[in-house]
Image (cartoon, helix red, strand yellow):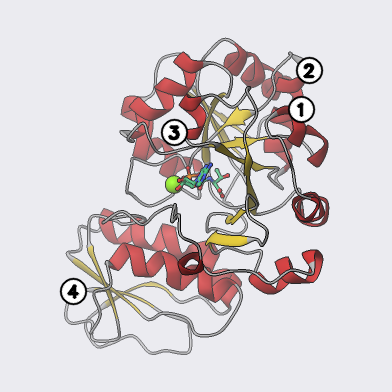
Amino acid sequence: MQIISNPTRAEIVIAANALKNGNLVSFPTETVYGLGADATNEKAVGKIYMTKGRPRNHPVIVHISSVNQVENWAREIPEYAIRLGSAYWPGPVTLILKRNSRASDFITGGQESVGLRVPNQQAALALIQEFEKLGGFGIAAPSANRFGSVSPTTARAVEKELGKYLGGEDLILDDGQCEIGVESSIVDCTQVNPVVLRPGAITDEMIEDVTGLAVLLKSDVSENRAPGLLESHYAPNAKVILGLSAKLGDGFIALDQIPTPIGSIRLAAPTSIEDYARDLYEALRKGDQLGLDKIYVAEPEGPGLAIAIRDRLGKASRGNRT
Ligand code: TXA
Ligand code: MG
């Protein structure tokens, strides 16, 4: 495995060739780092599952360069999905659409739908475009962490998570810290109304604005395929507890205005919801690096990105609160 920092165009071309040759390339997006493979290469996608330790029935998102590429992977695309892609791509939203024959079972986990996203990050877009120039159709990329663990928002975190599992020809592109810091919103566009399966930076209001349709809750639909609902997800080794009652030697994460409980170790003090999202996963990792047993987290209140943060914290903590 090799790490390429601040990749030049020439190095992006090398990375695109690595993908074309069936190797893995971890790359930054505006949300979190992804672990990429040629989405049409079964063996290469198989390496993603091995490297992450992820169950095979768990689908992966295909990253494409623009809304014009949607038809390469999907069929019977509703107009509202095209509106969403046109309005918010490149950006932090994944659209779930009916798959076409290019989207094999090894991408969709055997489901009849496929997840598509155009990331809003320069190196990522350049990588996808160079890959398409080589005849590629899309880059399959889940978050670049071991299954169930915290998504990486820096290349160092990718190296820590996956370094020992990556092969000799695999690459990590380091282009700094991810701007948003929590994973994309996932919108199921296979029904009459959009259904949000995972909240993110693209909010329900933003979806309703563009589509003119009401966003349905996950519980409103019979077939529940929500991601990240497994027992421990987005979780560090330390036990995450929601609340303020950190004791001596416990980790503590909260907005800046909330004081640090006496004796606890402040892991982050973000001054805005955006900073909270961006720094949360690195703060959880820092707790693990310090070998802490418990990390107490004060959830942010309010709408928008705060909803996504509370969603991830709910899963990281498995609902533990004081
Ligand atoms: O921000 C992101 O979405 C990042 C970056 C790298 O793009 N990717 C990411 O991928 O978070 P991953 O695999 O860690 O999470 C994607 C989630 C999975 O939980 C998966 O179950 C769900 O999306 N998903 C993918 N395809 C799906 C499908 N066809 N139907 C339902 N859920 C799907
Ligand atoms: Mg993930």
The residue that disc 2 covers is 133
Discs 2, 1 touching: Cβ within 8 Å: yes
Q: Earlier in the sequence, mark 1 or mark 3?
A: 3
Q: Which labelled disc corresponds to residue 109? A: 3
Determine whether the beta carbon of the residue marked 1 sits less than 8 angstroms from the nearest atom of ligand 1.
no
Q: Relative to the observer, which residue lies in front, 46 or 32?
A: 46
- The quarter of the picture where residue 132 lies is top right
Residue 243 at x, y = what percent? 30, 83
Residue 303 at x, y = what percent? 59, 81
Residue 197 at x, y = what percent? 52, 59
Q: Which labelled disc corresponds to residue 249? A: 4
Taking the image as shown, residue 89 lies to the left or right of residue 172, namely right
> Residue drawn 35% across and 39% down?
161
Question: Mark 1 falls on what kind of element?
Answer: helix
Q: Relative to the observer, which residue lies in front, 262 or 64?
A: 64
Mark 4 crowdedness (10 Å alpha carbons): few <14, some 14-19, many ≥20 = some
> Residue drawn 49% across and 39% down?
142
> Residue drawn 73% across and 36% down?
125
The residue that disc 1 covers is 129
Type of the residue with mark 2: Lys
Type of the residue with mark 3: Gly
Type of the residue with mark 1: Gln
Which one is closest to the eye, mark 1 or mark 3? 3
Type of the residue with mark 4: Gly
Determine whether the beta carbon of the residue marked 3 sits less than 8 angstroms from the nearest atom of ligand 1.
yes
* Residue 1 visible, this orientation: no
Q: Split into 4 quadrants, where in the image is the N terminus?
A: top left
- The quarter of the picture where residue 167 lies is top left
Q: Which residue sits furthest top?
A: 21
Determine whether the beta carbon of the residue marked 2 sits less than 8 angstroms from the nearest atom of ligand 1.
no
